[in-house]
Image (cartoon, grey):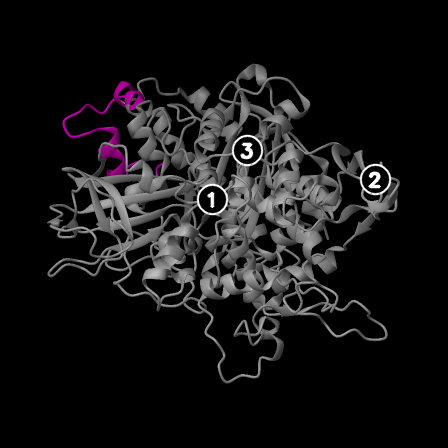
């Protein structure tokens, strides 16, 4: 899923690099507040959206952008709102989004974004609605109007009950802790339920790679809930316990610095070391267990028993303790179970709210009231305001997923607004008949629900034009009375950790045009939507599975760099095997894969990592020394014909992706521990050159093959993935590279003639052309 906020940044501000920075930015844009907050308004009424205000100026400064790809299900223009009467603008756009958060039908979800109180709607949105054509993330929706006497919009995200079950893995209640979470929908942080009775080791000494390294365990006296986050090479571990039906954070203590130094970047090294000790288990399987706490890919990855340890140091009520997260359950104890953010764990404060059966517009949820009005406290407007502005309370409210009716249903508006005419502790200043009628008149202009539902339900299955018929039923988009609302900010923040791509999204990452140096001139090469989408159909699912395992999906910067390197390495994923030229010094270990392995040593290391058994009785020919056939397990060149001298390679899709993931995490360059270490430094042109050098063996800049393609592709991927306001027409990039695509004759100081690349500075103007149908 590719998703961003409805307000974008200037290009120089758009490279948020950590989840903490992401949250700070979005919280400043969509803060918790007592008026216009989620899910309760200042008088105790349901308010299933957020007000985004504080816009100053015009043009891009008060623009609203689509948060994700989709189709317009409804729009209505502002009906000439008289702002002097303190009325809200009533322009509205609703977009239906179809995307993927994982594999199989369960991973195909439909949700909706609603942009209410717009003053101006972009003409392109109206055209897209009329033609039934897609809109894309960062397309201009329109410009803000007036909401609650502020320049801004009311913003909602909602979905059907069927899609809440897909999104969270359940329709009600709490997470089932008796078994580990879903394996087809895995993203973000990893969460562990550690039941009482689990052995804990309170020694200060860090364990080695064996299961029996620590002695004298102490059984845990309480259930513990542990979250592990990887980010930019580091690891963060937090613990909670359940007390009085509330998850309480255990104070954080500094962990063993030596054990955890650059933990994520060195995960490969740890897996290899453990593989040396547990020789029957492939390091690839150990790596997956260390990464996710379990084996996710049960088709291609070796199973792991409880004899392989997974040590971590966690906070407990008694102090820091080591725990083996892959240990067999202690006698009489429950097993440790493992989840991801894709399971919406309770201890991350996610709560499904479905306990208000009275359709009167007021929030009568007992769960929410227990937060707003703790036992013994008054139920008044002042108490409610204190609760809504209390950081701890508002944080919990923001993670609630609420099954409630839309406030924009014209047929029910009078019933749901009657409370405004009645004095109560929460509504001490009721509306008189005149003001109430004014409210009803304004709502008449703003309500849209039934018209939206009628339009939307004409498309109960996929409405995006590129979804094939076999997959249409995966997208359940029909809207009934069973509607669930998310806090829009938390929905966006949560799913920015899920970079699993749909075929429609991945196609857009393959540039329509690239600048290529021929001689001393740059020419433009292009790839059509049809060709790009055909590529996406073959590769997207397997790429997402591999990218997830090897951490490439963990950030948009990593993904942008990887795609930018892939395109010139493989010719848009068509040439994944180097021609078998006998003149190559490393024959027969020619380049294969997405990021191509070359040389016998690289193939041997990959074979050990993956645990590929030696094919003792197979006729391996030139691959006898290696012991397995990379032509079959990775890729081999296609057979040229009279009409096609450069046919596509014949690929083992899993092998092509897995070998490139291995390369990415195992490659050490200068003082960088892996390619991730390089990618996490940023996505500037300078960063792109460094990553390109890492892939090419840290050669001098003029000797980086395909550098112009790599840098153009990187800049293009940033347009798609980052949150910058789109360029108007083009952008310029400047870089040092070779003057001519071929080596030039030069004479050295001794009069000897030789060929070399001559360094020069290039400045390219890249037109803002996106990959679209």
Question: Percent position (x, y) of residue 619?
Answer: 57, 84
Is residue 54 rendered magenta in the image?
no
Considering every residue shown, the one lying at the far top of the view is 84
Judge the density around disc 2: few (<14), some (14-19), many (≥20) Cα neighbours within 10 Å: some
Q: Give the camera-side residue of 723 and 518.
A: 518
How far apart, in angstroms, are the residues tagged by discs 2 and 1? 44 Å
Mark found first going from the N terminus, 2 or 1? 1
Residue 53 appears anywhere in the view: yes
Disc 2 target residue: 739
How far apart, in angstroms, are the residues tagged by discs 2 and 3? 53 Å
Mark found first going from the N terminus, 3 or 1? 3
Question: Percent position (x, y) of residue 58?
Answer: 66, 20
**Is 439 drawn above or below residue 537 in the view shown?**
above
Judge the density around disc 1: few (<14), some (14-19), many (≥20) Cα neighbours within 10 Å: some
Judge the density around disc 3: few (<14), some (14-19), many (≥20) Cα neighbours within 10 Å: many
Residue 361 appears anywhere in the view: no
Q: For the residues carrying marks 2 and 3, which lies nearer the camera in this image?
A: 2
Q: Which mark is residue 150?
A: none
Disc 3 target residue: 116
Q: Give the camera-side residue of 54 and 425.
A: 54
Label 2 with label 3: CB-CB less than 8 Å: no
Q: Left or right: 258 with respect to 129?
A: left
Q: For the residues carrying marks 2 and 1, which lies nearer the camera in this image?
A: 2
**SS assignment at label 3:** strand
Mark found first going from the N terminus, 2 or 3? 3
Disc 1 target residue: 495
Q: Which contiguous range is marked in magenta?
A: 357-386
Q: Give the camera-side residue of 524 and 531.
A: 524
**Is 630 drawn above or below residue 192 in the view shown?**
below
How far apart, in angstroms, are the residues tagged by discs 3 and 1? 22 Å
Residue in the picture at 38% in, 47% down: 341
| Quarter where residue 5 is shown | top right
């Amino acid at each position: 899923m590719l998703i961003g906020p409805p307000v974008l940044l200037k290009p120089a501000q758009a490279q948020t690099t950590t989840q903490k920075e992401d949250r700070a930015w979005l919280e400043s844009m969509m803060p918790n507040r007592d008026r216009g907050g989620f899910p309760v308004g200042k008088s105790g009424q349901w308010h299933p959206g957020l007000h985004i205000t504080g816009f100053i100026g015009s043009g891009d400064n008060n623009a609203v952008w689509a948060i994700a790809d989709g189709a317009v299900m409804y729009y209505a223009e502002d009906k000439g709102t008289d702002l002097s009467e303190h009325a809200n603008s009533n322009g509205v756009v609703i977009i239906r989004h179809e995307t993927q958060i994982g594999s199989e039908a369960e991973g195909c979800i439909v949700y909706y974004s609603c942009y209410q109180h717009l003053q101006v709607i972009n003409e392109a949105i109206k055209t897209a609605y009329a033609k039934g054509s897609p809109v894309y993330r960062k397309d201009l929706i329109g410009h803000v109007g007036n909401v609650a006497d502020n320049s801004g919009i009311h913003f909602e995200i909602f979905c059907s009950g069927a899609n809440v079950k897909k999104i969270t893995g359940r329709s009600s209640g709490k997470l089932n802790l008796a078994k580990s979470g879903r394996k087809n929908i895995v993203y973000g942080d990893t969460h562990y339920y550690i039941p009482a009775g689990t052995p804990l080791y309170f020694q200060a000494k860090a364990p080695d790679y064996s299961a029996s390294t620590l002695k004298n365990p102490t059984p845990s006296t309480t259930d513990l809930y542990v979250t592990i986050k990887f980010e930019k090479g580091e690891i963060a571990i937090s613990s909670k316990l359940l007390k009085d039906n509330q998850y309480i954070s255990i104070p954080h203590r500094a962990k063993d610095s030596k054990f955890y130094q650059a933990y994520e970047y060195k995960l490969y090294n740890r897996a290899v070391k453990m593989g040396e000790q547990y020789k029957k288990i492939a390091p690839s399987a150990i790596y997956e267990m260390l990464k996710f706490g379990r084996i996710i890919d049960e088709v291609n990855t070796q199973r792991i028993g409880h004899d392989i340890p997974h040590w971590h140091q966690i906070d407990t009520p008694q102090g820091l303790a080591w725990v083996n997260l892959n240990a067999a359950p202690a006698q009489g104890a429950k097993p440790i179970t493992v989840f991801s953010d894709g399971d919406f764990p309770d201890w991350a404060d996610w709560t499904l709210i479905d306990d208000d059966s009275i359709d009167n517009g007021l929030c009568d949820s007992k769960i929410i009231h227990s937060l707003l009005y703790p036992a013994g406290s008054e139920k008044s407007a002042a108490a409610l305001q204190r609760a809504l502005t209390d950081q701890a309370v508002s944080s919990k409210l923001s993670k609630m997923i609420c099954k409630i009716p839309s406030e924009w249903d014209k047929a029910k508006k009078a019933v749901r607004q009657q409370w405004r005419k009645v004095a109560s502790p929460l509504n001490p200043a009721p509306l008189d008949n005149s003001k109430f009628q004014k409210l009803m008149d304004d709502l008449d202009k703003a309500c849209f629900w039934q018209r939206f539902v009628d339009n939307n339900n004409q498309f109960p299955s996929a409405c995006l034009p590129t979804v094939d018929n076999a997959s249409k039923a995966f997208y359940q988009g029909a809207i009934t009375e069973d509607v669930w609302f998310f806090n829009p900010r938390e929905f966006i923040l949560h799913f920015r950790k899920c970079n699993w791509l749909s075929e429609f999204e991945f196609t857009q990452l393959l540039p329509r045009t690239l600048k290529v140096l021929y001689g001393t001139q740059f020419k433009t090469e292009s790839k059509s939507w049809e060709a790009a989408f055909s590529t996406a159909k073959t590769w997207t699912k397997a790429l997402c599975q591999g990218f997830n395992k090897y951490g490439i999906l963990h950030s948009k910067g990593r993904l942008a760099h990887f795609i930018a390197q892939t395109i010139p390495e493989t010719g848009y994923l068509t040439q994944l095997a180097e021609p078998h030229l006998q003149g190559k010094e490393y024959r027969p270990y020619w380049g294969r894969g997405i990021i191509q392995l070359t040389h016998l040593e690289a193939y041997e290391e990959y074979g050990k990592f993956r645990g590929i058994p030696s094919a003792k009785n197979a006729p391996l020919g030139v691959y006898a020394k290696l012991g397995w056939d990379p032509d079959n397990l990775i890729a081999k060149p296609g057979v040229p014909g009279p009409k096609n001298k450069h046919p596509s390679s014949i690929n083992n899709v899993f092998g092509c992706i897995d070998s490139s993931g291995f390369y990415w995490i195992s490659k050490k360059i200068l003082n960088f521990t892996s390619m991730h270490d390089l990618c996490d430094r940023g996505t500037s042109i300078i960063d792109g050159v460094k990553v390109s050098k890492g892939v090419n063996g840290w050669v001098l800049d003029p000797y980086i093959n395909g550098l112009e393609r790599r840098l153009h592709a990187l800049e293009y991927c940033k347009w798609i993935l980052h949150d910058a306001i789109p360029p108007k027409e083009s952008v310029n990039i400047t870089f040092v590279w070779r003057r001519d695509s071929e080596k030039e004759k030069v004479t050295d100081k001794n009069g000897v003639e030789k060929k070399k690349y001559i360094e020069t500075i290039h400045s390219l103007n890249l037109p803002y052309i996106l990959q679209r149908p």
